[in-house]
Image (cartoon, grey):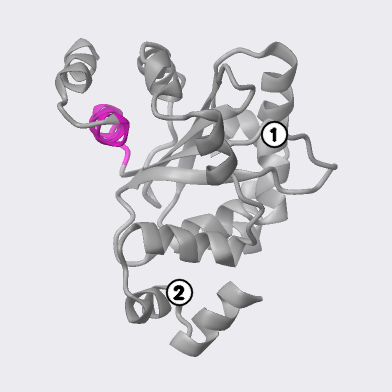
Amino acid sequence: MIRLLGDVAASRGGATEKRRVLMDGLARLIEAERWMWTMSSKTKVKQGQRPLYTPIAHGGFEDGLFPKLLKAVDHPESWEIFSPISKEIRAKNVHLTRTLRELDERDRFSRKELRKLWHDAGVGDLLVSICPMSSGDFSAIGIYRDIGGDEFSDREARIVHLVLAEVPWLHETGWTEEDQLRVLPKLSPRRRAVLNLVLEGQSRKEMAATLGISTHTLELAWLM
């Protein structure tokens, strides 16, 4: 862990590169395959509604898996799983890390439709770590393990929590108030999927292939 934090501090890149160095190293440390770092809005939403969030970095999602992850995350039952930690962090305003086992006491993840969505994204198990920011928004990290892999242990969750707690500056770095307003737009799930593919530098043809739609449908999805 100390070596990983040293590598992050020594990285010559900006905040985005440091996040990538940190998360790639942390994933290797706990034998995870994929991760996503998001910023989630402090804005409260009604029961059953999806909170506003925008991915700002991710790793390990090759072959069009990342849009499928967003689709799984956006499912209403996924947000039922994540609601308890959202409520807890709003109440306590402290950094929290939870395994899926701790989050999903009602075993929603095993339901056929939801399980298929996550499996389509290459996810068999997950843990989340959420850190409150000075703005009132939240820096939220999801770490994912392949289908068929072991569940994340309490020890692995503690490692994640300790490492991410040592970089409070990285949760904040690079975000002015203006940036936060721009990065948390009220976009539909499909539009956010398109936005993230644009940020990855994909062409219209590549984006359409990744999403499994025509270029014409892609353009309509953004205009609607």
Look at the picture and state if 33 lies above or below 1. below
**Main SS of residues in magenta:** helix
Residue numbers of the magenta segment: 15-32
The stretch drawn in magenta includes residue 19: yes
* Horizontal and vertical percent position of residue 167: 36, 15
Q: Is residue 110 above or below residue 207?
A: above
Q: Residue at x 39, y 50 (%)?
A: 148
Q: Which residue is mark 1?
A: 105
Question: Can residue 214 be seen here?
Answer: no
First reached walking from the N terminus: tag 2 or tag 1: 1
Asked whether 10 or 5 is in front, the reply is 10
Side of 152 relative to 110 (left or right): left
Residue under the point 53% across and 44% down: 183
- In the image, taking residue 23 as reference, residue 131 lies left or right, namely right
Residue that label 2 marks? 211
Is residue 34 part of the magenta span, yes or no?
A: no
Percent of width and height locating residue 205: 34, 82
Q: Please state if 202 lies on the left or on the right of 68 as rendered.
A: left
Secondary element type, mark 1: loop
Disc 2 versus disc 1: distance between alpha carbons?
A: 32 Å
